[in-house]
Image (cartoon, grey):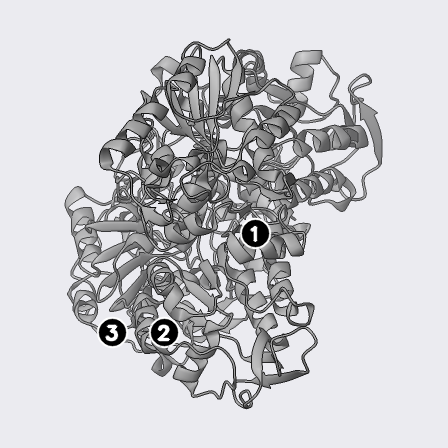
Amino acid sequence: MKRLSKMGDDDGAGADDDDTLENDAAEMEDNKNAASCEDDVSDDTGGDVYSLDGFDEESLSTPSHQPSGVERSDPSKVSSDRRSRGSRQRSLQKDDTNKNAAEENPNVEEPTIASDDKTLENDGEKPEEPEEETVAPPLPTPAPPEEDRPKRTLNLSSKLSIHECKLKGKRVLMRVDFNVPMKNGVITNNQRIEATLPTIKYARKKGAKSVVLMSHLGRPDGQVKPEFTLKAVALALQKLLKKPVTFLDDCVGPAVEAACANPKKGTVILLENLRFHVEEEGSGLDATGQTIIAGPEEIKAFRESLTKLGDVYINDAFGTAHRAHSSVVGCNLPQRAAGLLMKKEITSFAKVLEDPKRPLLAILGGAKVSDKIFLIENLLDKVNEMIIGGGMAFTFLKTLYDMPIGDSLFDKEGALLVPRLMEKAKDRGVTIHLPVDFIIADAFAEDANSGKSDLENGVPEGMMGLDVGEETNKRFADVIERARTIVWNGPPGVFELDKFASGTQAMMEAVVRVTRKGATTIIGGGDTATCAKKFQAEDKVTHVSTGGGASLELLEGKILPGIDSLSQASTKKSDLDKLKIEQCDLEGQRVLMRVDFNVSMKEGAITNNQRIAAALPTIQYALDKGAKSVVIMSHLGRPNGHPKSKFSLKIVAEELETLLGKNVIFLPNCVGGDVVEACEDPWPGSVILLENLRFHPEEEGIGFIDGEWRKPSPEAVQEFRNGLSMLGDVYINDAFGTAHRAHSSVVGITANKKACGMLMRKELDFFERILETPERPLLAILGGAKISDKIPLIVNLLDVVDEMIIGGGMAFTFLKELRGMAIGDSLYDKGGAEMVHEIMERAERNGVQIHLPEDFITADKFADDAALGVGDVAVGIPEGWMGLDVGPLSRARFADVIAKAKTVVWNGPPGVFEMDNFSEGTKSMMDAIVQATEAGVLTIVCGGDTATCCKKFKTEDKVSHVSTGGGASLELLEGNTLPGVAALDPNPDVQV
């Protein structure tokens, strides 16, 4: 018989170890039970089946050597897990009842599972009576008062990642999670092996000398047990990796150290099961079932032997991060970094715990309040709203409203905690949402008699609540709809039974909907991950955690040893993290603001006021914060250093007044005595617009005066800058489009505070995410006519990105040089051609894959009415014809590359999109970018022609960000420092 979780009791809550088969349980009939995995795992799991029967050991390089020199002596439990709770004795009776069966390896047959004081028999056999009476562990104690809690927190975003490590020529020692489900020596699901491939491949691509993999499998309890060998995993990995894998029959000792000391470049080595040694977990069992504990010296020797196997340590096993096991915390290498899987987990939880977009919503389920007390208490300090469902909702409803709950779950101990939790929610301004109606049943079974009830009528005796009702679904959906960040741990009903799954399904659908709209949605492993699998939503939310227990402890505010032990990333301040207007006290201050009002005009009329409208939020913010005045300065056109009426900003002042709904004072100059007097003590709340800055040659540092270009003297430039500086107390730059110009209004203002406005901040935030903290794979898409025009851009991005698509005219120079392709009259950059091989060599050194077009749409002239043709790399383009767009094969391939990326930066279209006959390649790429954005990928379009693409295809609001500064964005991507950004004050909140 099988045990089903009652009302969303997320198995992470009681996880004893590393959630060994938390994902695998999903393969075991949707995680309906945690009993005998050997019996319950089916073979049709979607993964390839690998059998140890007939295992071809010759296909793996397996050096023979003597057993490890590290003695297998009495290990001690080095982590504070529940199995060692209350005991440090050398001889303890083995107590299987304290182990979480969901974490057992499927090779181990579980004798029994108990549910609600009723023992469920396994295959008709009763469990053996224990030799001694066992005492159930006490319920978790209430959280201590806040002042008594440890103050140290885990800074997730500060941890070193594999991308920041130089791996070339290094031996990479990697902790992975190969704890796969097996049946009769057969791997029934290889998902965990597949999940590690990107990190392994990345290390090899970056030139690692070797990748030494270490993992556990099941619970051998410190003994060598053939059923737990990783040999079958080695074969499966070899097939998936399509590279030889060397399998070693131990994980420590002189022979292992020798095999890993100087391997051939690119070697992949898999060590034998770490848990064959008691020193890994710290404790184990001897042949008689007695607990043995490893001494400190034995653990130290074990860890030192592991450490000798690599030069850089990578942890890619989030599911074990909450355990202080030797392979998790004991590899003392200079660099200890997160792998790609671990980094994804860390980044995702940082979005919830460190810098969430708000409103932040927590959705919690589970059987008992007392099981989730630490989780609820910690999240009440962070969230704006909280939904409580599952079995524990009935404890809240009975305690708060004295609602009859029939035979529904009631947590007597947890009921004592409810008033305190509600009081804390009130103090923190957190709204808690509880169910208002229910689906009830007379039995915990699919064929139970069911009905409906609500808060007013309660649940009658003999019935139990197993799901939420329709009204609750609507209310919860409304709460979810307004959230910007969601973390979900525990379903609202017994989703494993279809009859009681509608509440969980409705909630999942609501979460998927807001994900499409840009919300960050994190599912915290365990039963909730199984929900995502059941309702096919795993790829429709932002992130599904691979570690139920680890994710739960993170959300509870605990320090995870496996993350805590990773090295800190560079503490260098970001050059793009600047003081923000929101960090400035503007009350009573004169705010001098540089904006970009360089609007398009025709015959003296503004044809597009978008740039004016874009500045309104920053202007209005300053006014709302009590600024005495907002003095606005801008340029318009190119008057070249002297007044020209057609470039006057007077018409802009009128448009600004209309949009702002407030009087705007226009001054006919930007410096001088009259301007200083007007701005010295204005009426509170005044908005003043200065005349065009570029009417003065001192703004740009040059002017066309009396028929020739002249530079003003340094003294004149300084006097101009001083004149501007006198007009305000706080300087705000909100003109990203001019940030790459060292003009006087951009770099020459002296003020108490110099900060970025909201537009500037948005630009800097997005480019920081690309250049300094990208989620990977990071893809750059580059177009353009000449390679020589894009050399600095390409070279800098090759040090940053993982993949690069090169299109546009410059692609033909690459194809001619690399493949000898005939390109006809297509663009060819002779100067850039000399750089092609150097670029490709740099890409290879950095492990960056460059994608070039394979086929083309050709034309006999550069015109929309040209005769059309097709070509490809093999056939080439004939003389008299030119390639003006990419063909269908290239479009499909580029779309596939985009779909696999997590961050995309795009500068330059792949074809002549301005002409409809040659726009399909660009439109196809734009469609792929939009689709990726909907899937949660960060997509940034970098101004210029690419921004025009967005406008043409009406996708400006369908990508993450369209930069307002073509030149500024290009220079940032080239690795240049922007003068307008460098001139701003650094963010004082950043800790170094």
Q: Position of residue 127 (x, y in %)?
A: 54, 45
* Kind of residue at disc 2: Gly
* Kind of residue at disc 3: Lys
Q: Nearer the viewer, residue 903 or 79?
A: 903
- Can see residue 99? no
Q: Which residue is mark 2?
A: 832
- Left or right of 885 in this view: 214: left
Q: Mark 3 or mark 1, which is nearer the start of the sequence? A: 1
Q: Position of residue 183 (x, y in %)?
A: 52, 64
Q: Quadrant of the C terminus?
A: top left
Q: Residues within 10 Å of mark 2 (few under 14, many from 20)?
A: some
Q: Residues within 10 Å of mark 1 (few under 14, many from 20)?
A: many
Q: Which residue is mark 3?
A: 265
- Quick check: 97 above or below 246? above
Which quadrant holds residue 454? top right
- Quick check: 13 above or below 283? above
Q: Mark 2 or mark 1, which is nearer the start of the sequence? A: 1
Q: Position of residue 441 (x, y in %)?
A: 79, 33
**Dot 2 lies on which element?**
helix
Residue at screen point 32% across, 62% down: 213
